[in-house]
Amino acid sequence: MQDAIANALRQGGMSAASARNFIRNLPHMLDGNGYKRSMNIGATEYFLRGIYSDFGPEAFKRATVSVRRQIKYYESKRRGSCQLSMAKMVQRLEEEYEAG
């Protein structure tokens, strides 16, 4: 993980803590499990597109389940200010990939 964090820092644009959180979220997304470390909408879309491209449609479906679980988690914490936007982004990607 340290090599991946160092690589993210070299490329710039994020802190070591953010890189660590994103790296830790990926396996949860691939398994369809919820994750607790937040990702902004842009990063989440980037991950979902990458998952579709690198792992295929079934992994993408599991990842969207994971994101929806994260949305519910944040709504339960009353920090859900952007969760509607996140849900709309997930829906848009699902429709985009279904249309092929």
Image: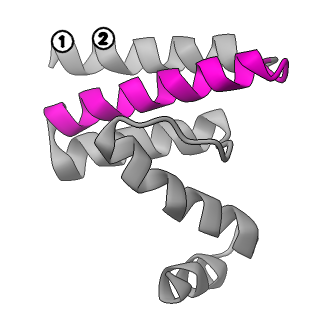
Residues in magenta? 58-80
Decide if residue 82 is on the left or right side of residue 28.
Answer: right
- Which SS class for mark 1? helix
Decide if residue 85 is on the left or right side of residue 51.
Answer: right
Quadrant of image for the C terminus: top left
Decide if residue 32 is on the left or right side of residue 73.
Answer: left
Residue 91, position in %: x, y? 42, 12
Magenta stretch holds residue 18: no
- Which SS class for mark 2? helix
Magenta stretch holds residue 79: yes
Q: Which mark is residue 95?
A: 2
Decide if residue 61 is on the left or right side of residue 5.
Answer: left
The residue nearer to you, when weighing 17 against 36, is: 36
Quickly name the residue at label 1: 99
Residue 61 sits in quarter: top left
Colouring method of the image = one colour
